Image (tube, rainbow, N blue to C red):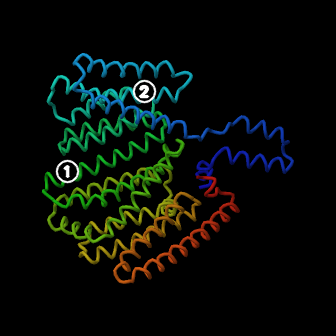
Amino acid sequence: MSKIRGEEMSRMSWLIKETKKWVSGGIITVDQAEQITSLYPAENKNRLIPVLLLLGAILLGSGIILFFAANWQFIPAWGKISLVVIPLVLFHLSALLTYENYPRLSQTLTLLGCIMFGSGIWLIAQIFHINAHFPNGMLFWLLGVLPVAFILKEELPLGLSALLLAFWVLAEQSSSLLIIFIAMMLFSGVFYLTYTLRSSFALVVSLISATIFVNTEIYLILTDNYRFDAAGSLIPFVLLLIGSSLVYMSKHPVNEYIKNFTFVYRFLGVALTGASLLIMSLEFFAADFIKMRQSGAGYALFWVLYIVVAFLGAYAISKRSTDIKEVLKENYTWLVVDALIFIVLLVPFNEITLMIIFNLFMFIWALLVIISAYQTQNSLYFILGMIAFNFYVLVEYFNFFWQSLPKSMFFIAGGAVLVLIGALMERQRRKAVLAWQKEGGTSIEEEL
């Protein structure tokens, strides 16, 4: 566990702190400490430049497209084709010329070239009056951008490829096996390149796109094959399973050895789980879930998805440890989530009972996250658990007292509750930081 905490710490801040101890202990001199730290230069965490370049690329690309659209009817056919081809070539050529001296600018120009390629698909189709299946344009755009990401090994075209893949699935609106197979093959390529580049940005976009893909296909399968009108209301259940699987994948050794990958999986997993439990505690979910159980519409599909997530979790955990006691100690929060899903799928609860179960469990889950974070000194889980628990309290306060209390009393009591919660959170945070510092672990400030 100390190894994991050490990997999550900022290596540079740890090294500086340790060299100060060595200097004060007389082990090394100040000059030697400076020589040691100079061997490990601090990473540049200034994200302002790439963010500005990315926003500039998006705005510039949007402006060019809007300019073409506004003046399209006044431009001759040869001019239209030139306006599509010339900027595309210029952006990629400029990216090539600036690659050595201005790599961030080069990546931005490459992204602009990829955006121009996509806009060119629809512009060319309009010039020659080509009537085609609209989602095919998204697919051709994707097939043009993904090779650029493979060849240049750049994360911005890769992130755009992942987004285009999700948009294509949404636009296609098909649950056919061919579409699912093609999407899975393309996602395999996207994730392979994401891990090759070790890009946290591409991982975030890819995981979100994959989540959209899974939910879209399950929704379409339920509506197309089972004619289940309330399929959209069951998406939180799918998101809960996906959230658990992301947390399990954060424990896989391959993610622990790539910077920020464990953090991305944990953050998205906890966020999806917490949001899903909140939505599932509402009345409409219980009613529609029972309706699905009674009609049998796609009920086996949820069992299959649950079994897949369970096997994925077992595989990811086993790659890290085979000691059953250690497995239970480190994963009891998520094993409890899996147990809840198993019971809900197995036992035919009525609507009221199901609502009560989920309303209670979302608080239990938040508390388990906080307790687990305190035991393992995981500051990310600690903060997210505290946020989730207090947000649940606030939501339930609105649900129960908005109608029953006078509005003045409602806001006075609500304000008092929020102040009390804030004070308790600050107290618990300070206690956790002090305890972790005494044990030699990392504080919340250091990890974030």
- Give percent across and percent down for residue 75: 25, 21
Instruction: Answer yes or no: is residue 127 visible.
Output: yes
Disc 1 residue type? Leu
**SS label for mark 1:** helix
**For this rendering, which residue is in front, 199 or 404?**
404
The relative height of residue 243 versus residue 118 in the rendered view (above or below) is: below
Residue at image coords 34%, 74%: 357
| Left or right relative to 148: residue 103 | right
**SS label for mark 2:** helix
- Give percent across and percent down for residue 167: 28, 41
- The residue positioned farthest toward the top in the image shown: 78
- Give percent across and percent down for residue 171: 23, 42
Estimate how packed mark 2 is, as few (under 14), some (14 to 19) or many (20 or more) residues with alpha carbons within 10 Å: many
- Residue 220, labelled with which disc? 1
| Left or right relative to 176: residue 375 | right
Residue at image coords 43%, 18%: 93
Q: Assign the N terminus to one quadrant of the image.
A: bottom right
**For this rendering, which residue is in front, 59 or 300?**
59
Disc 1 from disc 2: Cα separation: 35 Å
- Residue 110, labelled with which disc? 2
Residue at image coords 76%, 38%: 36
Estimate how packed mark 1 is, as few (under 14), some (14 to 19) or many (20 or more) residues with alpha carbons within 10 Å: many
Disc 2 residue type? Thr
The image quadrant that residue 310 belongs to is bottom left
**For this rendering, which residue is in front, 174 or 387?**
387
- Residue 33, labelled with which disc? none
